[in-house]
Image: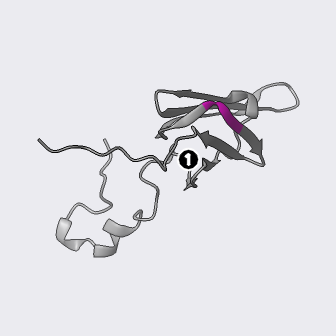
Amino acid sequence: MSNLLPNNNFFDLSPSIFFENFTRPIFPNFPNTDIKETSSEYILDIDLPGIEKENISLDYQGETLYIEAKQSDENNETDQEGNIIRQERNTAYINRTYTLPNVDENNINAKYTNGVLHLNLKKNKQDVTSTKHIEIE
């Protein structure tokens, strides 16, 4: 087992070693998402770079939008005799949910362009002008 710290003596360490990976994302499999809400719809832009459109699944159920994306790539390089000189496999799996209440399930539009999934989720029409008076007993 290798040491996690590059030095065996804790007191000889530079304080900067604790912060060298500070800017690395905590959840690298969570896509960056922009969410905008208007009075009539939700607008989402979700970054899914390198994912093929066929590998993205979208579902909306019970006020929740479910997104699942999978991508697998294999790179097998061979020499002139056909011997493998390098073999790499990259796999990405993204599973994320968004709570978006009051969405008209029949009026959701999705478009995928240049690695960005753009969603428009229209809200159900509600009569917001009506007011119900509540009597206090």
Q: Nearer the viewer, residue 137 or 90?
A: 137
Where 85 sits versus 81, above or below? below
* Residue 15 position by quadrant: bottom left
Mark 1, residue position: 31
Q: Amino acid at mark 1?
A: Pro
Task: Give left or right: position of 122 versus 82.
Answer: left
**Rendering coords of residue 3 (x, y %):** 30, 51
Quarter of the rendering containing residue 120 = top right
Q: Residue furthest right?
A: 80
The count of marks equals 1
Name the residue: 58% across, 55% down: 38
The 10 Å Cα crowd at callout 1, few under 14, some 14 to 19, many 20 or more, is: some
* Chain part drawn in magenta: 105-109
Left-right relation of 41 to 101: right
Residue at (71, 37) in percent of width and height: 109
Percent across and percent down for residue 27 are 44, 48
Q: Is residue 106 magenta?
A: yes
Q: The C terminus is located in which quarter?
A: top left
Residue 14 in view (yes/no): no
Q: Pick the residue in front: 100 or 128.
A: 128
Can you see residue 114? yes
In this rendering, position of residue 117 left or right of residue 11: right
Label 1: state its secondary structure: loop
Residue in the image at 63% along x and 41% along y:
122
Q: Position of residue 78 (x, y in %)?
A: 80, 31
Magenta run includes residue 108: yes
